[in-house]
């Protein structure tokens, strides 16, 4: 199992994350990942990190598909990959309607077709076999409703790699099936290895639909996992709860919150409903307190080194091939390397 480092996104109070990425490279981490929501963008942050490192893979977890055209996504990927010497891992996702429509001002549309078509267009642009012509449900290139002056084009710059690994973030059954079918890797968040069975049918369905060529390629299961290291187990649980409460309670509207739905599928129906109710009422402290310790323990790694070393085996046994650690303190970075190396 490979080890990645999640640096999330910048906030007004976060320090410069570049030294953490440099330290991760020294420690032997395989990859470093950055995110975006409606604040800092992932491309600028990843470029900043890439300029200060030389070996570690650079992942986007995730770039928001509806916020960019597929062509811009391919141009960005080709540029980052060339400048970094072939280190890019392109993580994509559709985000949610609250962000896409409320922030980017574009219809959420058809998330499944949008994802499928974006991945296909990006791959075709990078392959650079011919000028791009594409007709789909979500995208039409060249556009048919414009001035009529558009013409098929080929990426001006030859990419360093014609195939860049593409990861898809997915939680719902249909999205997980799509990721298994078309992607090189899957980026689940709040993944519970203790409930891996709820994803199995969707993954198997996707694997069965892979092309013969793609069935020969590896598929990287790469969840982001909060790591709260410390001797006080309850304090570690408490440290992981605010982020869970934010996503379960506040990242989406009632009836349209993917993280809340996932929590319900884990068996926490009443708890998920209460967390969301409290969070949307502005009672954030109460929502955080409503997150069960047992849920935290299923989706995060908490406690002293010995306990984390024991708990991480569940991720191995569930088939996780890259564990993207999101440590609450930099001191956990070296500890995770030691654990995965059996020290």
Image: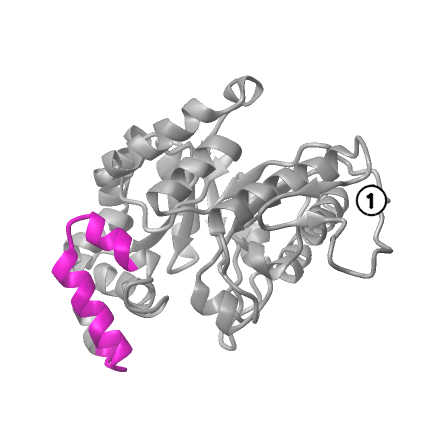
Residue at horizontal 59 percent and vertical 51 percent from the top? 22
In the image, residue 272 lies in the stretch drawn in magenta: yes
Residue 59 in percent (x, y) is at 57, 47
Q: Is residue 222 visible?
A: yes
Residue 221 in percent (x, y) is at 42, 35
**Does 120 sit above or below residue 13?**
above
Q: Is residue 87 visible?
A: no
Residue at horizontal 52 percent and vertical 53 percent from the top? 62
Q: Is residue 76 left or right of residue 66?
A: right
Q: Is residue 160 left or right of residue 171?
A: right
Instruction: Give, as a single range, the part of the protein colored magenta.
Output: 260-285
Which quadrant is the N terminus positioned in?
top left
Residue 114 in percent (x, y) is at 55, 49
**Does 10 sit above or below residue 198?**
below
Q: Residues within 10 Å of mark 1 (few under 14, many from 20)?
A: few
Which quadrant is the C terminus positioned in?
top left
Front-most of residues 161 and 142: 142
Front-most of residues 191 and 321: 191
Residue at horizontal 18 percent and vertical 65 percent from the top? 273
Residue beneath label 1, please? 152
Residue at horizontal 23 percent and vertical 81 percent from the top? 283
Dividing the picture into quarters, in which one does residue 232 lie? Answer: bottom left
Residue 319 in percent (x, y) is at 34, 29
Count of labels in the image? 1
Dividing the picture into quarters, in which one does residue 159 lie? Answer: top right
Q: Is residue 195 left or right of residue 146?
A: left
Disc 1 is placed on an element classified as loop
């Amino acid at each position: 199992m490979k080890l990645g480092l999640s640096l999330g996104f910048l906030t007004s109070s976060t320090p410069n994350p570049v030294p953490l990425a440099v330290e991760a490279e020294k420690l032997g981490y395989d990859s470093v990942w950055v995110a975006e929501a409606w604040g800092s963008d992932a491309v600028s942050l990843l470029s900043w990190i890439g300029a200060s490192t030389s070996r570690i893979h650079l992942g986007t977890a995730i770039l928001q598909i509806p916020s960019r055209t597929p062509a811009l996504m391919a141009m960005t990927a080709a540029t980052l990959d060339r400048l970094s010497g072939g280190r890019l891992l392109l993580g994509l996702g559709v985000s949610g309607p609250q962000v896409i429509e409320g922030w980017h001002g574009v219809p959420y549309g058809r998330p499944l077709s949008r994802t499928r078509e974006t991945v296909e267009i990006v791959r075709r642009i990078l392959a650079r076999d011919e000028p791009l012509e594409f007709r789909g449900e979500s995208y039409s290139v060249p556009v048919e409703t414009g001035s009529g002056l558009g013409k098929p084009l080929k990426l001006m710059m030859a990419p360093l790699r014609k195939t860049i690994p593409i990861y898809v973030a997915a939680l719902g059954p249909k999205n997980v099936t799509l990721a298994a079918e078309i992607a090189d890797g899957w980026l689940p968040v709040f993944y519970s290895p203790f409930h891996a069975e709820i994803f199995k049918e969707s993954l198997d369905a996707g694997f069965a639909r892979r092309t013969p060529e793609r069935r020969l390629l590896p598929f990287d299961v790469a969840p982001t996992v909060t790591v709260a290291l410390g001797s006080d187990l309850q304090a570690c649980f408490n440290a992981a709860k605010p982020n869970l409460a934010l996503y379960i309670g506040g990242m989406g509207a009632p009836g349209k919150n993917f993280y809340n739905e996932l929590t319900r599928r884990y068996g926490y129906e009443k708890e998920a409903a209460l967390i969301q109710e409290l969070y949307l009422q502005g009672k954030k402290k109460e929502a955080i307190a409503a997150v069960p310790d047992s849920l935290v323990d299923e989706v995060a790694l908490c406690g002293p080194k010995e306990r984390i070393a024991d708990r991480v085996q569940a991720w191995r046994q569930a088939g996780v091939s890259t564990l993207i650690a999101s440590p609450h303190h930099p001191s956990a970075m070296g500890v995770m390397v030691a654990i995965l190396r059996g020290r």
